[in-house]
Image: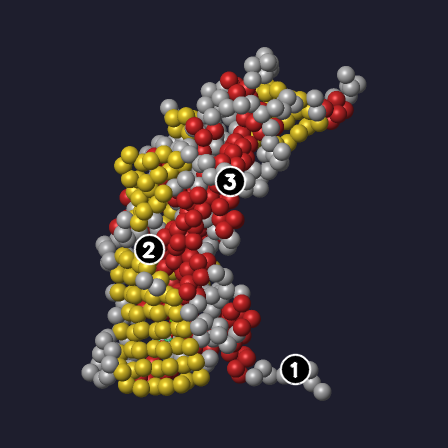
Amino acid sequence: MSAIRRLPPELARKIAAGEVIERPASVVKELVENALDAGAGEIRVELLDGGKALVLVQDDGRGMDREDATLAFERHATSKLAREEDLDRIATLGFRGEALASIAAVARVALRTSDAGGRPGTAVEVEAGELKAVADAAFPRGTRVEVRDLFFNLPARRKFLRSAASELTAAAKLLTLVALGHPAVRFHVVHGTRVILSAPAVAGLRERVFQIFGKDALDRLCDVACAEGGYRLGGLASKPPTGRPDRTRQHFFVNGRPVQDRTLQAALQQAYRGLLERDARPEAFLFLTVPYEDVDVNVHPAKSEVRFRDSQRVFGLVVRGLESSLRGGPRVKEIAPVSAAAPGPGRGTGPATAAPGFRVEEGRPAPLFDPAGPAPAFPAAPRVLGQYLSAYIVAAGDEGVYVIDQHNAHERILFDRFAEARTRDRIPRTAALLPLLADLTPAQVVRLETGRAALEEAGFRIEEMGGRTVALKEYPDLFGPEAAREAFLAALDDMGGEDKGERRDRVLATLACKSAVKAGEPLPREKMEFLVTELFGLEDRALCPHGRPIMILMERGQVEKGLKRQPV
Ligand code: ADP
Ligand code: MG
């Protein structure tokens, strides 16, 4: 008997759907792209339970007539591609004619649409790929698609959906990207009754960045523009030397489509080499326009990857475009390596706690970790020899020579102190003299919903001010006001974590990271001694709260053996 069987159509449909639709955010993506392709000036998105219960997208685009409204749900039915040659010049976001069919195969879908051609509108209902109803329905020009109970007929898949908060975060990120790519379109996004994004149509990218990320973000960016042959690059990118701590704000668009692409990422990195502060990464919203025939967008069902015909050319254009746009900005001084200082008098008898308080901001001591407190009783801390490359403390003990990462070490110390203060509910706070306002991104708004308790336990008091603005009424007494706001936003960005304890630790790790000395900071001897003493007073000092190593040890035996000396 033959081993190969044809899959029943229903099963085949479900499998194919899974390639396009992975989670609620994929539904949002496909529906919003359809709205944009239909020429919408206004797009409204409503979500329930992170999109698991409902994704609704309504637009005021050109709509469909009755025939198209039913045909739209058939696989490979599209108005955007007619002949094979068209595949070489795709100007729309969609073209595969799979999205509606895929969504309808794995959810309950209700569509209303009208092309305002003098006829009534149409309502269509499809459930698990079966057409349930088609009827006339009054509707203004445009289309509304409601997708309920995603994967209700694929329990295995449904089980893999994350919490409502995670799914919502993914959708919010996606919508942020789409909104950045289409400043002339009004976006209004709500989750239940909460407005996540309300962005009226604006003139251009600058205004959109301002709407979504606020004035501070805009101040950090400069315009990028250049053209070569039929290729154009435009957008906004970090003004050196200020960058961001991570790559989360590097967004690339090719012919209006948000994409993830190694070539573009590498070009960005290359253009900023040596321009940013140590450990900083560029922030960028880059829009590349290339002739349609020079880019293949049909690489992946989710259409988030592209293939360039000539990626070398793209790389060169982006590097040159950025370089010429950034020229004139201040260059970061190369940080001169500082060789390890000669051994000092050692820690001697004076306890390291005589060191002056650490300053998070110039002129501001950090009272939470007052080094004048009792010294930990660990006499065995190695002796500081000096600082290497402004980033490492070199110290020697009986067991050998340590090279200690100053930032990771300080982070570990602060984290442990902080965690201890929290368990005793004794995190000191400062009341803000003037409420510190922070404008949140849609993704940050979402994370605040789940992460609020963790942030409040860490010393922030947060009040909603309407829209996406919050006021910090209190903050941990460890930061000055500006640094407190920055740390708060960073904590929101890093939040993640499905469980409460995990979220709490992440917040503390971020705060510790933000207030710890940085790599590249020259440290006076007392600070180094303070750090080493504190570090060796900890039981667990192998890894920083983010899991990076804190120090390496070259054992005494290795030194002696390497130099062919007898042990002294
Ligand atoms: P694709 O976008 O790849 O063509 P879809 O399955 O997403 O495939 O949509 C199928 C067709 O349905 C589209 O080509 C378009 O003609 C029509 N359509 C879908 N959504 C809309 C909308 N919001 N407004 C107008 N037409 C739409
Ligand atoms: Mg589509």
Give the residue displayed 25% in from the left and 65% down from the top.
Answer: 41
Q: Name the side, left or right, on which 64 lies relative to 94.
A: left
Circle 2 residue: 180
Q: Between residues 316 and 360, which one lies in front from this camera angle?
A: 360
Q: Which of the pair 548/459 is nearer the observer?
A: 459
- Disc 1: which residue: 4
Q: What residue type is labelled 2?
A: Leu
Q: Which mark identifies residue 423?
A: 3
- Can residue 134 be seen by looking at this rendering? yes
In the image, what residue occupies the spot 39% across and 54% down?
A: 449
Q: Where is residue 242 in the image (x, y as percent from the top left)?
A: 38, 37
Give the class, few, some or many, for how many residues have Cα within 10 Å of label 1's Cα (few <14, many ≥20): few
Could you say whether the residue bearing mark 3 is in a helix, strand or loop? Answer: helix
Front position among marks 3 and 1? 3
Query: Label 3 amino acid?
Result: Thr
Instruction: Specify the amino acid type for callout 1.
Output: Ile
